[in-house]
Amino acid sequence: MAFCPECGAPAPSAGAAQTGVPAGAQAGMPQGAPGSGQTGGIPGAMSPIPPDRPAGKNKGPVIALIVLLALLVAAGIGAAVWFLAGDKTERLLDKADAALKDKEYEDALDAYEEVLKREDDNVDAYLGSAEAYLAQDEYEKAVDILADGMKANKKDEDALGDLAKQLVTVCQDGADYYMDEEDEEAARKLLESGMDELERYGLDKELGKLEDTLQELNGWGGSFDRGESATAWEDDDWEDWDDGSLGDAIDEWDDADAWGEDVWAQGGYGEGYEGDVIHTEWFDFTVLGGLLLDPADSISADGQTLLVAVTVENTCDDVLTMYDTDFQIQWGDDAEDAYGWPIEDADEVDPAFLPGEYTLRAGESVTGLLLYEVPFGSTDFSLSYQEYYNDGSMGDVFFVYFNALVDR
């Protein structure tokens, strides 16, 4: 038996297992070498401690771990606070929306205000507030709150689009309300304030809609002047027509509803009769009736005057521009020229006539008169409309047949 020369302890024999070498490892083979089955240093061996760091005092990793845990806890608390704040905002929005649905407008406005105190760019709160004001006919307040929302979201195109769409609705509805109250100045100011906001943010599409509405307003009621010689007849001629059965017919037509059937085109063609609702791609129209003036009252010695009452309703989502020349008149004659177009500028003589150009908002309808000159003796007519697309191609064509009354 051999002894260690340093300490005197018995030394292991050459065939004995070495302490710290795993069973099955080859003695003398470096750990981690190919064929050793190991991937690292010696198992169980302790790393040496630097002379200047006493054993048991290595606290650096422990402190780092504590700091890391503290940061994670703080982050968790912050996330929880953020989540709870967001949850509170959502609950306030739900409360406001419920109050709005129940027509409790003041409660709704208070709740929306609380939302905006938390999130000054919350689009839903601005839209809901505007709707609450709109329901109470407080159009100027609705415009103001939407203007605030646009300012707070001026860099968000989607938010600006939603707010601008609501602004157009507010201004158009407000203009209608003020015109019904015969307060044209208030209607004009409301439209102009909305246009200013839309122009500020370069929202040209919505701005164009309000410009169309303002142009339409200029043709309502007493807001436009009659031209002295803008048409082929004089005002005193109209005064002669506007008595007796003609005046009664205009009033009757203006209050009339469609009473016929629904007509859609089949194979590019559709036909109906007086009172039917004709469905085109962009609008519905109904011929309510026709009236032939007494030949003595006609505006021209070359023919008799025909008045046709129609109702037009915009069924598309956008503002629709219409023209009186959209509707052509035909009479019972096989000649190629047996048709005519409305006489221009009739609306400058009396607003009962449809203007040469007018706009209809989505869902809006108008009832008015079209003025034609037709051959003497004609009583059977058809009013037609041909669909045209921007590329010049044609769509469906519609004919409505009617017999005109004769004013005697």
Image (tube, helix red, strand yellow):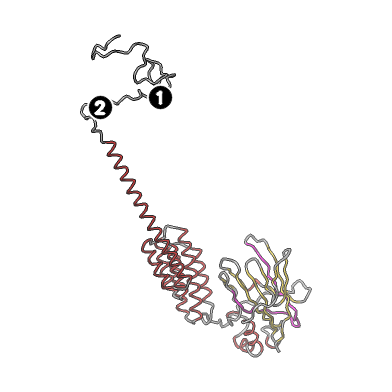
Residue 381 position by quadrant: bottom right
Check disc 2 and report its element: helix, strand or loop: loop
- Mark 2 nearby-residue class (10 Å; few <14, some 14–19, many ≥20): few
293 lies left or right of 110: right
**Extreme residue toward the left, this view:** 52
Q: Position of residue 358 (x, y in %)?
A: 57, 73
Dominant SS of magenta comes to strand
Closer to us: 236 or 380? 380
Residue 256 in the image: x percent, y percent?
A: 64, 81
Residue hosting label 2? 49
Q: Residues within 10 Å of mark 1 (few under 14, many from 20)?
A: few
Between residue 338 and residue 310, name the one nearer to us: 310
The magenta segment is 365-389
Disc 1 residue type? Thr
**Is 181 on the left or on the right of 338, as rendered?**
left
Instruction: Check residue 39 in the rendering and tell me which mark sits there, or answer none.
Output: 1
Instruction: Please tell me whether residue 372 belongs to the stretch shown in magenta.
Output: yes
Please report whichever mark, 2 or 1, sits nearer to the chain's N-terminal start: 1
At mark 1, the secondary structure is loop
Q: Nearer the viewer, residue 42 or 194?
A: 42
Residue type of the residue flagged with mark 2:
Ile
Q: CA distance from mark 2 to mark 1?
A: 23 Å
Residue at left offset 73%, top offset 66%: 269
List x then y, in percent, for residue 6.
Answer: 23, 13
* Quadrant, the N terminus: top left
Vertical arrangement, residue 190 with respect to residue 206, above or below: below
Picture disc at residue 226: none
The question of residue 302 being in magenta is answered with: no
Residue 260, image quadrant: bottom right
Whether tag 2 and tag 1 are in contact, CB under 8 A, the answer is no
